[in-house]
Image (cartoon, grey):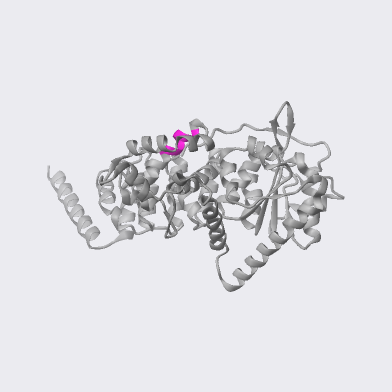
Amino acid sequence: MGSKPSTGRHESKPEHEEPSVQPQSKPTRTVGSGDTFSPHEVPEMSDKHDIKRLESVSNRDLMISYSHVDKEMMAKLRESLEKNGISVWVDVVGLGAGVDFLSKIGQAILEAKLFISLLSTSTVKSKYCQDEVALAYISQKAIFPVAIQSQEEIYAIMDTGMKLQLASLEWTFIDPENFDEGFKELLPKLKAELEDQEKEVNQGHQVKKRLKERQKKFKREVSLHLDPHLSESPNVYWNKFYKNKENVDLNQFAEDFLKYFKEDLNNVYPAEDQTWLIDNLKEEVAMSIDSDAKEITPKSLADFCTVDGEEQALWQRVTSYAQDMYAMKDVFAMDSTVRVDAIENLGKYQSASVINSLKDLLRNEDSNIRAVAAVSLAKTGNQDKSTINVLLKCLNDKDRLVRESGCLALGHMKAKRAVPKLLHLWRNDFISHVREAAQTALIQIGGEQVDKAMHITKVLAEEIRLLTEET
């Protein structure tokens, strides 16, 4: 998955802001016709302690993501929530992207129990707001889209990735002219979710599992209203095109997929994104067979469409896959160092979205990203076949650091299937650090095959050394 270029932001400082409470100079963005502003402008506070209070990340029930244009609505929403016992965190100092996005806003998203995206046409134009929704999505937060304009107005200019991420969620509409009515609809939803999460934590259950089940239920309900061909199982799709065939060339599969779903793809994805999506889709489907597979089989297609033991329709699975891809693309469209730190942090999470996203990052054009993603993927503890396959592919990478990271990741996972390739690297790689990493991985994996191969190699190396000394 390729990364976007750096956005190249400028630095500025509002005249009314107190230096003692500003952690860094505030970035600005230009949106629309010459309107330059920070993403979240500082609301007027009674004193600096109010700002510090709102900067605190820990122990907050909810985070609000918003555009500074909607700061009055944000303040009204925040005040109403806190009056009803829901603690709120908002970015009131305009942290923007970069290190502070990940350390402050990112931390707030990860630690908050609920996430509100205050949606307007200004919100969906903001790269900052897109990043916040994307990070909340891949972190499997309980996301509540709250629209203060009509869905038609917002959808008309909404980024494809954001649209996909919010499509499977229930929206709440609040008319700024009739705030109380919309808030009365929103509040019970938030309180119910907080109560459910508290019960699950007390009982030791996983909140994220229930959220995923709720999302799956919504998708199933939506699929009932789709055109029949969008609800076709992978088996039905295969028999329509490749009946009695055991395998099909990946390029042929991609060509047929594009033709069959042409109108549907055009309705959702820009032309350039369709190429990007299909290229990644081909690799993802192939990974269930082998790291170097060039063909697709009925089983590999079915494996791709099976998530948490439940088979999805092909179109539905491609849509959910695209949601994850867009989310990662948004979150890591920052400078390389920041992305590396963020990806390393993802190793702590074991959600399917994060694991799939880390696999996708192993195809990133930045070798540092690929190397860190390999190690982070190993840290998730996931050891399914496609995970091993993408890591095996790292052993063929042209970058020595990626090969080294791939070795260490496979060793950490004790992946026995990797032994032949690790032995090859240990014996033949021209970089000593890669050979050492392969040896470390082999020792971690262990077993009779490894012991025998390593013993033979060492004996031969000693014989060669002795012959060299004699000459």
Q: Is residue 452 left or right of residue 241?
A: left
Q: In this rendering, does residue 334 appear at all?
A: no
Foreground of the two, 425 or 27: 27
* Residue 274 is a magenta residue: yes
Foreground of the two, 11 or 181: 181
Q: Is residue 310 left or right of residue 460?
A: right
The single residue placed furthest to the right in the displayed view is 46
Per the rendered image, the range of residues in magenta is 273-279
Residue 18: x and y, percent? 81, 43
Q: Is residue 47 left or right of residue 206?
A: right
Residue 253: x and y, percent? 34, 39
Foreground of the two, 447 or 430: 447
**Residue 113 drawn above or below residue 273:** below
Q: Is residue 435 left or right of residue 207?
A: left
Q: Quadrant of the C terminus?
A: top left
Residue positioned 25% across, 43% down in the render:
428
Q: Main secondary structure of the magenta part?
A: helix
